[in-house]
Amino acid sequence: MNISKQFVTLIGAVLAVGILAAGVFLIALPLAGQASATTTDADMVAQTNLGYETQIAGLRESEADLAEIEASVAELQREIPAEPRLDDIFEIVATAANTAGVSIVTASIGDTTAWTPRAALTSDSLVFTDGASDSSDPAVTDGATETGDATADETATDGSTTDGSVTDGATAPTEPKVQIGFTVTLISPSPAQAQLFIDALGDGNRLVSIVHSTLSPNTTAYDLTVNATAFVRTEN
């Protein structure tokens, strides 16, 4: 009889452990997993809401500056004429050269093409073609990118130039937004004056984008070639 009681007690203990294990695996663990998933989802929602709040704050800030933005856009539109006005380009080049104290060798205007976005001019766009650099001028960096012959080939394609000459190869615009490329070669006494000329091109009454510039030393000064773009707004 004592053996039977022990056996019953053992069976009861085993059943109790089994019930507890079943409760853990069937109820507690799933609930813990759901709680963890809910916490993760809540964190993701909080991060998403934070992103939305940041965007909304940015939009509100932009809305507050809307008048200033519209004024800036209007100013840029005034710098983009509705006709080529090629004389303006040559005037801007001449004024910039006079401001910087550099001498124009050639200036040529290429064909009118459809407008394409241009990257902003960086400090390494003005380089020495022989690898030499001037540490006092951050606009001049090591490493050759283009030679003067390559630039001359471009000039010959758009319209042949000779020393001191100005050519006009522009055609009538046919696209709603078009651009006119032009190339200027100059003699600069120093890299600083070459950079000053490039900066002065943007001070004119017309929007000008610098595509590329090359600076190479000669026996007495520096040869500067600048490829730039002016824009035409032809829509009504």
Image: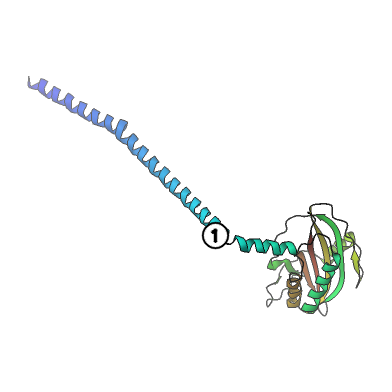
- Which residue is painted at 68% across and 61% down in the image? 73
Q: Amino acid at mark 1?
A: Glu
Residue 29 vs 155, above or below: the answer is above
Looking at this view, is 99 or 104 the one in front? 99
Looking at this view, is 7 or 86 the one in front? 86
- Give the percent coordinates (x, y) of residue 103: 84, 77
Q: Quadrant of the N terminus?
A: top left
What secondary structure is marked by label 1? helix
- Which residue is painted at 84% across and 55% down in the image? 173
Report whether residue 6 is seen: yes
Question: Quadrant location of residue 191?
Answer: bottom right
Q: Give the color scheme: rainbow, by chain, secondary structure or one colour.
A: rainbow
Q: Return the residue at label 1.
A: 61
- Give the percent coordinates (x, y) of residue 107: 86, 68
- Which residue is painted at 67% across and 64% down in the image? 72
Q: Quadrant of the C terminus?
A: bottom right
Q: Is residue 63 left or right of residue 175?
A: left
Question: Quadrant location of residue 66?
Answer: bottom right
- Give the percent coordinates (x, y) of residue 156: 90, 62
Looking at this view, is 92 or 1 the one in front? 92
Picture mark count: 1
Residue 181 vs 137, above or below: the answer is above
**Label 1, residues with CA under 10 Å away: few <14, some 14-19, many ≥20:** few
- Which residue is painted at 84% across and 64% down in the image? 85
Q: Is residue 63 left or right of residue 157?
A: left
Report whether residue 129 is seen: no
Question: Quadrant location of residue 67?
Answer: bottom right
Q: Is residue 72 left or right of residue 97?
A: left
- Give the percent coordinates (x, y) of residue 190: 76, 78
